[in-house]
Amino acid sequence: MKLWNETVSAPAALACGYTQLRVMSVLQVNSQAKIQPPANQSEPLLKKARQIALAAQEVGGRAFLVGGYVRDALLGLSPKDADLEVYGIEAEALLELLRRFGRVDCVGESFRVYKLVWQRRDKHSGDLQRYELDVSLPRRDKKVGAGHRGFLVEGDPQATVEEAARRRDFTINAILCDPLTGDIVDPFHGQDDLKRKVLRAVDDKHFAEDSLRVLRAMQFAARFEMEIEPSTVELCRTIDLSDLPKERIWGEWEKMLTKPQHPALGLRAGHRLGVLGKLFPPLEAAMSREGDKLCRALDNASEEKVALTYERQITLLLAAIGVFLGGEGTKQLLDALGVKTLANYPVREQVLALIDNAAVPFEFYAHQEEVSEGELRRIATRCEPRLLYALARALGAVEAAEWFINKMRALGVEEGPPVPLLMGRHLLEMGLKPGRQIGEITRAIYEMQIDGTVRTLEQAQDAARCLFESE
């Protein structure tokens, strides 16, 4: 199979085949079957990969695009990053070769990944865009200790494709592609699993050595809407997850929540794999108790998140889960994920506030004749009304949510509470001396503003004057 239906102009040697390497011993390329080429075959990552592959070929090596780039291209997606694996060239020689193409950053100690970094001006916007291509030797992993990080990783330029691919997690990520010809190398039949939407471990022994792969199964099942193969499920259930650090757990959860169209598929997979029971007991209990409702709310929230900033998207999605866990269960979930803030936004605080007020739109709508403007404004001081609106819709209270957001919009508090009319500097200008009284009076006036009894700065100053003169 070819990933795209073209070859790259190269020296005559290219047309005759590459220098014979040990890598060739496992190549099984089907060049008869073809699929649609990428939308933009000259896109920067692919173009740079081809340049490096040609340079490697000139000194007796061979380069393959590997992992997510190939998988996504086969699925008709636009890969956002790329990894290139170079066979037949020693590490120092590879580094010197790469330096011909731009700045190279070296990452890792025992096993180095070379990040080739460059900039290119966008034809349409004129802005400089930054690109990174990760280049490495084939790697060998040796388990030398317990846990997710207990590995000795070494580069082996003489490894075969099959040896290198065997260390990968799933067959869909163990597919290689020659960037010059588009030829696919697929020693573990990952293309078949992609077509059948089956997520399958490449090698049980290697898979079990890295516990993070269990969480990757969870998010891949959601992102690509795949069924996890039964023996892979059983393998995952046997793996201890207690060694995983919070930041790595959150990294997989973040992808599971934001990348799929239906993130609830990830929760269902986590339930089946035993992830929820091991790492998130309150969520496991909620899935057992009312999993269908929880999953429906999460998928609805995923639809509602589109117009929100990224950190608010995360907040909404976590709140949609948290409603079914309660306050304490949600705190345990957030603790396990290590989530507090994102981009200086108080995610944890807002998630808990949304859970506490989740029923408000429905309750206010049911008793709308009795709800005052002050009560509506006060909700805006507790949580973001637009997030509460989106959460209400996710929970199925669509009519109540629309009534609620229209009321908040009419009061000018759709995005948050009103800005205080009276500030400390106003009180100083009125002759009040600095001290505790300043804060007490500004808070009291703000409560009047929320209730609607104070609507202008002049009214706020008059009310403040009455307060400090009475004291």
Image: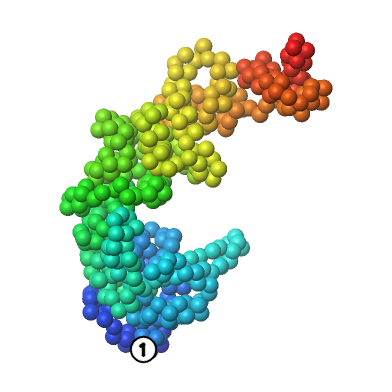
Of the pair 438 and 12, the residue shown nearer to us: 438
On the image, which quarter does residue 196 sit in?
bottom left
Front residue of 252/290: it is 252
Which residue is painted at 76% across and 19% down in the image? 461
Query: Is residue 76 among the parts visible in the rendering?
Result: no
Locate residue 113 relative to residue 453 in the image: left or right: left
Report the residue that reaches farthest toward the bottom: 12
Q: Position of residue 386 (x, y in %)?
A: 52, 32
Quadrant hosting residue 283: top left
Picture colour scheme: rainbow
Residue type at mark 1?
A: Ala
Could you tell whether 398 is left or right of 176 in the image?
right
- Residue that appears at 30% across and 32% down: 286
Residue 413 rendering spot, x and y as whole percentages: 59, 28
Q: Which residue is mark 1?
A: 13
- Residue placed most toward the observer, 410 or 413: 413
Q: Is residue 358 above or below residue 270?
A: above
Name the foreground residue: 9 vs 141.
141
From this viewpoint, which residue is outermost toward the front?
A: 145
**Residue ID at (45%, 77%):** 95
Q: Badge 1, how many Cα within 10 Å: few under 14, some, many 20+?
A: few
Q: Is residue 185 left or right of residue 427?
A: left
**Quadrant in the picture for residue 406:** top right
